Image: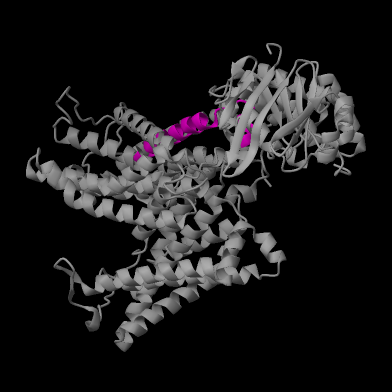
Amino acid sequence: MADSILDVRGIHKSFGALKASDGITLDLKPGEIHALIGPNGAGKSTLIKQIAGGLNPDSGSVHFMGRDVSVMTVAARARLGLARTFQISALAMGYTVLENAVLGAVGETGSVFRFFKPAMKDADLLGRAYAALDRVGLRDQAGVITSELSHGQRRQLEVAVALTLAPKAFLMDEPMAGMGAEGSKELTTFLQDLKHEAPILLVEHDMDAVFALADRISVLVYGKIIATGSVADIRANADVRTAYLGEEDAA
Amino acid sequence: MIGAFAAAAVAGWTGSYVLALMASLMAAALFGALIELTVIRRLYARDHLDQVLATFALILIFSEATRWTFGSFPLFLDTPDWLSGTVMLPGGIQYSLYRLAIIIIGLVVAAGLFLLISKTRVGMRIRAGENDREMIGALGVDISVLYTMVFALGAALAGLSGALVGAIQSVEVGMGEPVLILAFVVIVIGGIGSIKGALAGAILVGLTDTLGRTVLPVVFSTFMEASAATSVGSALASMLIYILMAGVLIFKPTGLFGSA
Amino acid sequence: MIAERHLNAIILAILVLIPAYAVIADEPFTITLATKAVILALAGVGLNFALGQGGLVSFGHAAYFGIGGYAMGILASHAQSYTPLMEVPFVIEGSNSMPVIWLVAVISGGLLALLIGALSLRTRGVYFIMVTLAFGQMLYYFAISWPAYGGEDGLSIYVRNQFPGLNTLVPIQFFGLCFVILLIVLFIVNRLNKSPFGLALMGAHQNEERAKTVGIDVYKMRLVAFAISGAITALAGALFADLNRFVSPVMFDWHTSGQIMVFIILGGVARLFGPIVGASLYILLEHFLGGMSEYWQIYLGAILLFMVLFAKGGIIGRLSKKEQTHGG
C-alpha cells in the first residue's frame, strides 16, 4: 500500500504465554483519522509502543513513510516525523509552556548539540514554538509553569509539542481522557482540522468522540484486530457488538 | 560496625563470645529501628539523591560518633577457644574452624531468609509491600511497623556479620565501607531485584577477586621480571572485579539475573 | 528574598574581598583557605552540571578529581626528576607548565568520563549511583596498588608549577589564577545551561520519555554532558594537587565524591553558584568546627542530614526566589 503513511504488518508480541499482539495488521492513510478501540487489556498500549518505538515486536514490521522503522529508537522515529501524545501527560513539569514547546523544536531541528546560543532567544526555535502554541491557542499561557496548567491545557500543550515536530503522522493515546464535555467538543473540532495536515491514529474509549471523528475504526480484542471499517460498518458489525460495544456503557 | 563494636565491648566485659554475638544483634537491631523511625521513613518518597545524601550523612555521624566513644585505635575481638583451630576437610585440606563456622552461619541465614520471605505470612506481606505500598496499607497491614522490622532485621544481620568478621580482622571505624562497595558490585553484576543473582554475583565476585590476586602476578611473571610482575599483577587484580562489572554492564545492563 | 543574580554578585564580592583583606592584614593562610574554597567549588561546578542540570547522580566524581590530580602529579614529578614518562614509541617529557598540565587534566577527565559514562548511563536510578561509585573505587584501589607514583603514600611535588607571567608561589597570585579560572568556567557552564543542549538536558531530567518523543537521543546527550562534567572536575583536581603540592589515592576515594556532593547540596542543587557557597561553608566548618573538636564531621553530618530532610534547595534556595533558568 504505497499510499499509507503508517503500515503495520503482522505484528506479533508475546510476554511469556500472553499474546499481547497476535498478528496485527493495520495502516494509516493520508488525511484520515483511524481510531483504534477495544476493551481494556486488549493490547492497545503494547501496540502503540511497538509503533512508537519503545518496544520491539517479536515478528512483523512497522513501516513509516515507506521506511522500515521496526528497530528504530523512539527518538529516531520522532525525527522522521512520528509525533505522539500521551494519555498521562508527558511534559517537563518544571518548565514553562514556552520552554516545553521550544524543547520540542530543539528535538526537531536536531540542534541538541548546540552549546552556545541561548535556546530561548533563538529566533528559529522560538518561531516554531510560538507557531505550535498559536495552533492550539496557548500563546497567552506561554510563561505559565506547566505544573500549574489545567488538565485540558496540558492536553493542548501535548498537542503543541507534537506539532513542533512538523509531524507526518500522529499517534494519540486517549486525548479525550479527563476532558469535560466542552473540552472534548473543542478537541474534536481541532482534530478534525488537524487530520488534513497529518493523519492520526487515535486510541480512544470515548465512543461519542470516536464516532464523530473517525474515518475508519479498527477493533482490537485479545491482541487481534477483529474488524476494520467505517463508522457505519463497525456499528453494524455483530462481532464487534458482542465483543465490545455490548458490554460497554460509558467508556 | 556497630555490631562489631558492640560485640567487642561485651566480649571485653563478659568474656563470653555468645553473649557478644547476641549483643551485636541487639545493638544493630536497635540502631536500625531507631534510624528507620527517625530518618529512613522520611526518605521513602524522596528522590535518589536525597536518599544517598541522607545515608551518607548518617555514615559520617556514626563513624565519627563511634570514634568519639571508642577512640581511634581498633578494638580486638578474639575468636573463642571452642571455635579456633583447624578442621580436616575431605580432600585433606586443613581449614580454619572459625571460617568454616562463618560459612555455615551464612548458609543458615540465607536459608532462613529465603524461608521467611517465601514461606511465611510476614514474608508475603513484605513482598506485597515491595510491589504496592498503598494497597497493602489499604488491606489493613500496618506497613510502617513492617518496614521498621525489616530494616531492623537487615541491620541485625549486618551487625552479626560485623561481629563475626571482627574476630578475623580488626574492629575499627569504617570497617563496613569496603563491604558496602563490594555489595554494590555484587548487586550490579548479579542483577537488579534478584536474590539468586545476589548469590551468583557474590560467588563470582569472591572467586574473581581471590583468584585474581593469586593468579595474575604469577601469569605476569611468565613474561615480565618478578618485581614488575607483582606490581602490575596486583594493581590489575585490584581492579578485576570492577572490570568484571564493566563487562556485565556492556552485555547485560540489568545484571546477569536481573529484570529491568 | 533576593534575586539570584544579586545574590551571585554578593557571593563573588565576598570571595574577592576576603583574600584582599588577607593580603593587607598579611594572613597568607586565609588566602590559602580561600583558594581551597575556589578550587573545591570548581569541582562542584563540574558535578553540578551532570547532577543538577542533568539529574545524573554520580557518586564517583572523585574519579575525575583524582585523574586531574594525578595528571599534574605524574607530569610534574617527571619534570622535577628530569625523566621522560615514556620513550617508546615516542618521547613524552614531564611538564612543569600549568597550561599544559591543565590541558592534559581536562582531556583525561573528559575521556575517562566518556568511558565510565558509556557504561554507567546504561543503568538508571540507584544502580547508576552504585555503578559510578564502584568505578570511582576501582581507580582508588588501582592508585593504591600502582607503586610508580607513590601508591598509598601519595606523591609530593616540591615545586609549584609555573604559569607564564606569574609567580605562582605567591598565595594571592595563585588565588587570582584559580579565581579567574572559576569565573571562566562559570561563564561557560552558564552558556551551556541556557543553550539548546542545556534545555534538552534539563528537559530529559524532568521527563525522559518526553525528550525521546521529540526526537532527542537522550543517551548520547547525557554522555556528552557527563564528559564535560568530568573534564571540569578534573581541572579542579589538577589545581588542588598544585595547591597542596601533593597527590594521593584519597583524591579518588568515595568519601571525596561524597564531599563534592555535599558542596552542591549545601549551596543548592542546580544553582550556578551553589557549589561556591557550599564549598566555602564546608571550608569554614572544617576550619572553625575542626579547630574545636576532632569529631567535627558529626556536626557536618548532622547539618547535611538536616538540610536533606528539611531544607532542600540549599542556602541559595533559602535566600533567593526560584529563578527560571530558561525564562523567555
Q: Toward the viewer: C138 or A229?
A: A229
| B142 to C205, vertically: above or below | below
Q: Is residue B142 left or right of residue C302?
A: right
- Residue at the extreme front: A238
- Residue at the extreme top: A2
Counting from the top left corner in percent of width and height, residue C19 is at 43, 44
Among the 4 quarters of the image, the one containing residue A66? top right
- Residue at the extreme bottom: B14
Which quarter of the image is occupied by the C terminus of chain A? Answer: top right
Q: Is residue C44 left or right of residue C153?
A: right
Q: Is residue B91 left or right of residue B6?
A: left
Please report the residue visible at 36 percent of the width from the left and 75 percent of the height from the top.
Answer: B5
Let me know if residue A99 is in the magenta part.
Answer: no
Among the 4 quarters of the image, the one containing residue B104? bottom left
Q: Is residue C176 visible?
A: no
Q: How is the image coloured?
A: one colour
- Which residues make up the magenta segment? C209-237
Let me know if residue C210 is in the magenta part.
Answer: yes
Number of numbered labels in the structure image: 0
Please report the residue visible at 36 percent of the width from the left and 68 percent of the height from the top.
Answer: B107
Counting from the top left corner in percent of width and height, residue A130 is at 75, 22
Counting from the top left corner in percent of width and height, residue B82 is at 23, 83
- Residue at the extreme left: B225
Q: Toward the viewer: C281 or C298?
A: C298
Counting from the top left corner in percent of width and height, residue B164 is at 32, 72
Q: Main secondary structure of the magenta part?
A: helix
Q: Is residue B105 left or right of residue A172?
A: left
